[in-house]
Amino acid sequence: MPLLGGAALAVTLRRFQPALPIFAMSGLDSHTSATHKDFAAAFLAKLFHAETLLSLVRRTLDASPHPLITAREIARRLGIATEPVGKYRFHIFRKRDLRTTAELVRYSTD
């Protein structure tokens, strides 16, 4: 990923949501589930089928003891208004021509 690697992103996310269910994926031969065990609940090696990803997401979310944080909670933890959080999400969807969260997941795996 440009600017911030997956491990660094996971560490940053954990500061805000320690129980966040994170899973990693990589197309690099040197990356394995052992490489990601310190920060990821699960690992996928690219190339994989969409059904495999969806199954992993479902299992990971079902195993999570806590719900994912909301935009309101993100804003509270960052000390900002809720509106910028929603606007940021909106801009991501608009710039990538996405209409649903499912499309966002699919885009992130391409």
Image: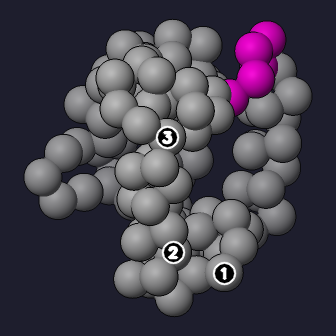
Instruction: Determine whether, in the image, residue 83 is placed left or right of residue 42.
Output: left
Q: Residue visible at 83% across and 49% down?
A: 55
Look at mark 3 in the image and give the residue it sits on: 82
Q: Residue furthest left?
A: 3
Query: Amino acid under label 2?
Result: Phe
Q: Is residue 28 above or below residue 77?
A: below
Left or right: 3 as drawn, with respect to 39: left
Q: Position of residue 57 (x, y in %)?
A: 74, 44
Q: Who is closer to the viewer here, 68 or 82? A: 82
Q: Residue at x 44, y 61 (%)?
A: 87
Work out which quarter of the rendered image holds the N terminus and state it: bottom left
Residue ID at (39%, 50%):
84
The chief SS type of the magenta part is loop
Q: Position of residue 109 (x, y in %)?
A: 53, 67
Asked which secondary structure carries label 2, the reply is helix
**6 above or below 66?**
below
> Where residue 93 is drawn, which disc sits there?
2
Residue 7 shows up from this direction = no
Determine whether label 2 and label 1 are within 8 Å by CB: yes
Q: Which residues are magenta?
A: 64-68
Residue, disc 1: 99
